[in-house]
Amino acid sequence: MTSPSPLEHALPPELVSDWEALNSRWQEGPLREWLEALPDQFSTGLSPARYGDLSRWREALAALPPLPTAAIRLNTSRVGLSGTAPDETMDALHSALMGLHPWRKGPFELCGLHLDTEWRSDWKWDRLADAIAPLTGRRVLDVGCGNGYHCWRMLGAGATEVIGVDPTPLFILQFKAVQHYLQQPAIHVLPMTLEAMPEHLHVFDTVFSMGVLYHRRDPMAHLASLKHKLAPGGQLVLETLVIEGDDDALLEPNGRYARMGNVWQLPSPGLASSWLKLAGFNEVEIVDVGVTSVEEQRRTPWMTFHSLEEFLDPEDPTLTIEGFPAPRRAILTANVI
């Protein structure tokens, strides 16, 4: 069987190493079907013709200075590197990474430079880490992974391969900035949506979908697609906005919620659980429910735009600016046979 031709000269330069690694690993087995589609998906996902800021972000990536060899940290709240570097190196590092502003998911730390991101994504990880099946030895998919913060935590938890997918080019280059220093071969963040993957790809032992469900007009179709990516015995980890209420409670904000666009359906935790069962999942559990605080999502020097505080009613922070209940999130787990 011949290898699919990647036409490497046409691939985005940031993704050539991903292609080489995945082409080496996926030549045999069920992932070969996806492998054949990757060159076109890479070129579309990081197309300069589609994304006018791409050249500026690439300049920032190219400006990253060399850092001294240091310990890699994947199991701490701040993913990154230990160690120190000269002031001029740190100034260059700060400038290059700020060229990839805004940083939404994190935190990260490189040789003492703390990227204090909009989200304390480590808090979400702490809420779910002990509630999911151990990731040791597992192949993991993270859907809508942003810049890959949680992908790093999954790798640190023992996963043998972590694949993140996200359609936002800036997030891909932020991941590449961190990967430039961490150089871990078994983790990739690819520029595409879940829908771009082959429909039936039952190869992942754990699939994460965090912060995606409410952006789908058809949540059941999203759950079905996630199920089709799981290997027999695999686990789904679903995190989503929810509302208080009984097992039938549903909020439909008609596309706008807490100044977020493309928000369609917010179920109660009970209704989300029912959706999972209806989609064919088993052993459904609600493992965490809580209100998102302005300490968990906020403006920082690394994300200077409006954040949660500006998205809430200034007279009543229990409501969004539109008058809906303030953000509440639930984490659910479910298995397939």
Image (cartoon, helix red, strand yellow):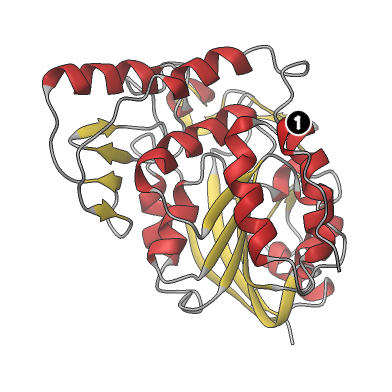
Q: Amino acid at mark 1?
A: Ala
> Do we see residue 128 in this rendering?
yes
Residue 170 higher or lower than 130, as above or below: above
Give how far across and how far down residue 59 sits, in percent.
Answer: 49, 15
The percent position of residue 285, horizontal first and vertical second, equals 59, 76
Q: Which of the pair 106/216 is nearer the observer?
A: 106
What residue is shown at x 19% (from left), y 46% (from top)? 82
Residue 115 % position (x, y):
31, 32
Q: Nearer the viewer, residue 124 or 311?
A: 124
Camera sees residue 143: no
Q: Is residue 7 left or right of residue 132?
A: right
Tell which of 33 and 1 is nearer to you. Answer: 1
Q: Residues within 10 Å of mark 1 (few under 14, many from 20)?
A: few
Q: Quadrant of the N terminus?
A: bottom right
> Which residue is disc 1 drawn over?
10
Q: Is residue 50 above or below residue 251?
A: above
Residue 243 % position (x, y): 62, 50
